[in-house]
Image (cartoon, grey):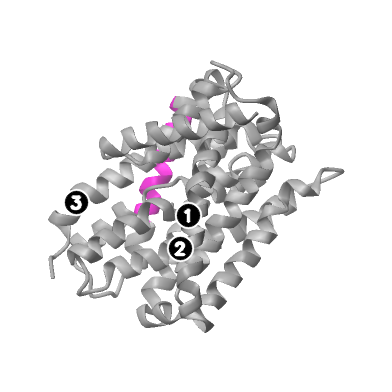
Amino acid sequence: MLLSLTLILISAFLLGQVMKKCKLPPLLGMLLVGILFSPYILDLIDPVILGHSAIIRQFALVVILFRAGLSLDIQKLKLLGRPAILMSVIPATVEIIATTILAGLFFDVTPLEAVIMGTVLAAVSPAIVIPQMIKLKEKKYGTERGIPELLMTGTSANSIFVVILFTIFIGISVGGEFDFTALIGLPVGIIAVLIGVILVAKFPMQAKPVATVASKIWIPAEIMLFALVGATINPELLMNDGLTAVSLILLVLSVRFIGVLIALIKTPLTLKERLFCGFAYLPKATVQAAIGSLPLLIGVNAGGIILSIAVWSIVITAPLGALGIDFSYQRLLEEN
């Protein structure tokens, strides 16, 4: 098991660095390693690790939400006001509604399963957006109107909002006997969010070293999360759903983009700045990887389809969003 674990960590890290050199999110390399090492291809992952993959994903979800809580500064949220709150809620809500309506046309799913699919899709990836916004702050692009702060705060709150909705709808879907431990990461994650928010609000000096430790813990957790998500995917089934999944994702992304523009109505942002915010809200990755397999794990009939959609959303939107931010900020934002 130790050899398998070491092989995953080293290979995923190295391929992640290759992706980074290509200006793509490193998590794509981690996901690819998981797919290649899976039982469906090279079969290099120890069965013991695969057997504990649910626990590892739960741990990763708790770390994601804890870090989101630490980055969610209530004072900044109040300062940014209505746009930050609307950016936390409206784009995700319209994407969930669009997915609920369209999923039944693309797949054989019930309305409740379509809603669950929507909540899986609707989270923006803090792991991609926040580092990009920090870079923009350092380069002083969009800082006069607080665009990096708006997007960092909105992204963190968006992840929390979506996971809460996912928890509600997945709870409604549960019937009969099932293993409640499969869902334990959800309430623990919400508690972790609250702890993070309280730390930042009440103990800001202590929150800084805690955030540093959490970011270091996230490095191996992220590698294992994306590698194990890749390992659960049957490439044949992934390709079978490919064209339909990609079509659905692109449609709901278009609706989400409109949701961002709606959230920014009556703000001082220019049209270019609003378009940039739309691009910045495209990438999905961390939350999808953490919760995408849960419906399948607890026996939701459409769980396999939801997992496939989650993986395709990462593959499409993570590079699309990251590259969109990189190639558009100098054209769409003012340097201050």
Q: Which of marks 1 and 3 is nearer the N terminus?
A: 1
Q: Mark 2 points at which residue?
A: 212
Across and down, in percent, residue 21 comes to 26, 37
Residue 255 on the magenta segment: yes
Which of the pair 209/189 is nearer the observer? 209
Give me the disc on residue 216. 1
Q: Looking at the magenta stretch, what is its main secondary structure?
A: helix
Q: Do the residues labelled 2 and 1 touch (CB within 8 Å)?
A: yes
- Quarter holding the C terminus is bottom left
The kind of secondary structure element at disc 3 is helix
Query: What segment is highlighted magenta in the picture?
Result: 243-258
The alpha-carbon separation of the residues under discs 1 and 3 comes to 30 Å
**Foreground tag (1 vs 3):** 1
Where 57 sits versus 88, above or below?
Answer: above
Name the residue: 35% across, 41% down.
25
**Foreground tag (2 vs 3):** 2
214 vs 55, left or right, is left
Q: Which of marks 2 and 3 is nearer the N terminus?
A: 2
